[in-house]
Amino acid sequence: MLRKYLQRFPFIAITRGMTPEYALPCADALADAGFTIIETPLNSPDALLSIERLATKFPDLLIGAGTVTTLEQVHAVKAAGGRIIVSPHCDTEIIAETKALGLVSVPGVATPTEAFRALQAGADALKLFPAEMLSPAIVKALLAVLPHDTMVIPVGGIDAENWTNYYAAGASAFGLGSSLYTPTMTIDEIGANATKIAASWNKNGDSTQ
């Protein structure tokens, strides 16, 4: 399921700090630009309520949570209608429970050991985090030893310009945080950032790899 969404548009919107009141207009702006996946980190205000509203209003988008660190949170996200679980770390129990509940699992990894452990536990893709310390050269070297169909998603410091370097190294998709969304941005600013990302993808997406 995850690959289907990423093939349409390989960027995940990370809306850290978003409030439930802001969730629907923010998602409208993101969807208009082409985003198909929205991740609301659980350390955002009333994150589960935002996820519930988004999942209800946008059933065609892949809605879920980031910063998931406990098994209880996995169950709470599912109950809210979320379908993707993203973690900052590699916890095999969280991965296994996520898959047992029929959800998409994207744990955070930063080393080959973590990457193989996550895949063995059933992860659908690997969140390479923090990308600021994982250069495109490191991504390329990591992919050389991982199974050939592994989806890797750099997160942390990714913007409308530097994603192309990671894409050329073999990254499948990208998580966008503050370069796309912060709680202080207006809907127009978020829409402009999202449109900038879409324009960059349309210009570079087919020719970088």
Image: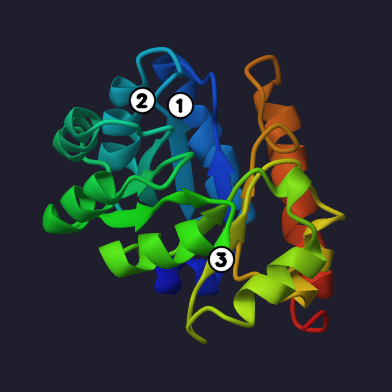
Q: Residue at x 45, y 42 (%)?
A: 89
Q: Earlier in the sequence, mark 1 or mark 2?
A: 1
Q: Is residue 69 left or right of residue 178?
A: left
Quadrant (top left, top right, bottom left, bottom right) of the C terminus? bottom right
Tag 1: residue type?
Ala
| Gap in angstroms between the C-alphas marked 2 and 3 | 26 Å
Residue drawn 35% across the image and 14% down it: 46
Q: Which mark is residue 23?
A: 1
**Which tag is nearer the camera, tag 1 or tag 3?**
3
Disc 2 target residue = 50
**Residue 31: x, y in percent?**
53, 49
Q: Amino acid at mark 2?
A: Ser
Residue linked to disc 3: 152
Task: Look at the numbered discs 2 and 3 and tell me whether their residues touch, using CB distance below 8 Å.
Answer: no
- Give the number of the mark in front: 2 or 3: 3
Q: Is residue 21 above or below residue 94?
A: above
Please determine whether, in this image, residue 182 is positioned above or below residue 3: above
State the CA–CA distance, disc 1 to disc 3. 27 Å
